[in-house]
Image (cartoon, helix red, strand yellow):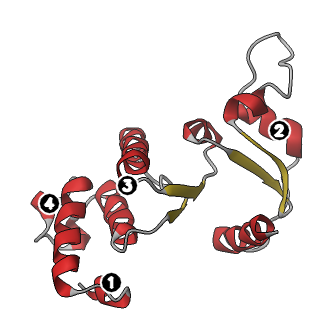
Amino acid sequence: MFHAELYGMGKNLAKERIEYLLNFIELYNFKNKLIKFLSGGMKRRLEVGRGLLHSPAVLFLDEPTVGLDIQTRINMWDFIDKLRDKEKITVFLTTHYIEEAENCDRIAIINDGKIVAIDSPSNLKNLIKHEDGGIPTLSDVFIYMVGKEIRNEAGTSIDRMREFSKIIKK
C-alpha cells in the first residue's frame, strides 16, 4: 500500500490493482510471505509488479535477469513478453546478456555513452557478413560496432541509462 500511496492511488483502486498484479506475476499464493523468503526470480517479479502498480506507459528495467539461473531467466523473458502484450506498455531495459536482446523489438548499441547502432535484431545482424558465411549473432554485431578491447568504465548502469535518456530526448 505504501507504493500506491506514493502514486496517489485511492485505497480501493490500490487493493484491486495489487490483487490483479499478484495474480499476473504469479505470486498471489505468496502474498503473506516475507520478501526475504522469496527466491531471486520471485523478488524480481515482485519488483516489476511494484513498478506496474500505477499503470505506467513505460516500464524501465535495469538488467532484469542479472544473477538469475537459466530457467528463471527464460521465465523472466516469458513474463516480460506477457507483460508487453497484456499491459500494452513499452518496456525499456538494459542488459549485458546480448543474446537476450533477441527478444527486443529494437536494440541500441551504446559505446562510450553514444549510440553507435539502433535497429531491430534482424536488421542489425544484416549489417555484417559472418566470416565463415554463417548467420551473424548479436555478439558479432556488438564486436563489429565497438571492437574487442576491454576498457575501464566509469559510472553505474543507472548513470548510463540517464545518459541514454538524454540522447533519446533530442
Disc 4: which residue: 28
Per the model, the C-alpha gap separating discs 2 and 3 is 34 Å
* Res. 54 image quadrant: bottom left
Residue behind mark 3: 87
Q: Is mark 4 on a helix, strand or loop?
A: helix
Q: In this view, does 161 lie to the left or right of 82?
A: right
Q: Which amino acid does label 3 sit on?
A: Glu
Q: Dot 1: what SS?
A: helix
Residue wearing tag 2: 143
Is residue 148 visible in the rendered structure shown here?
no
Question: What residue is disc 1 on?
Answer: 3
Work out whether residue 106 or residue 137 is closer to the camera in this orientation and state it.
106
Question: Residue at left 33%, top 65%?
Answer: 49
Disc with the residue nearer the chain's start (4 vs 3): 4
The answer to whether 68 is drawn above or below residue 29 in the figure is above
- Say what amino acid the circle numbered 2 marks: Ile
Name the N-terminal-most of marks 1 and 3: 1
Q: Which image quadrant for residue 125?
A: top right
> Would you call the spot at circle 3 few (<14 residues within 10 Å), some (14-19), or many (20 or more)?
few
Work out whether 36 lies above or below 129. below
> The disc labelled 4 sits on which kind of residue?
Tyr
* Mark nearer the viewer, 1 or 3: 3
Q: Which of 163 and 82 is in front in this view?
A: 82
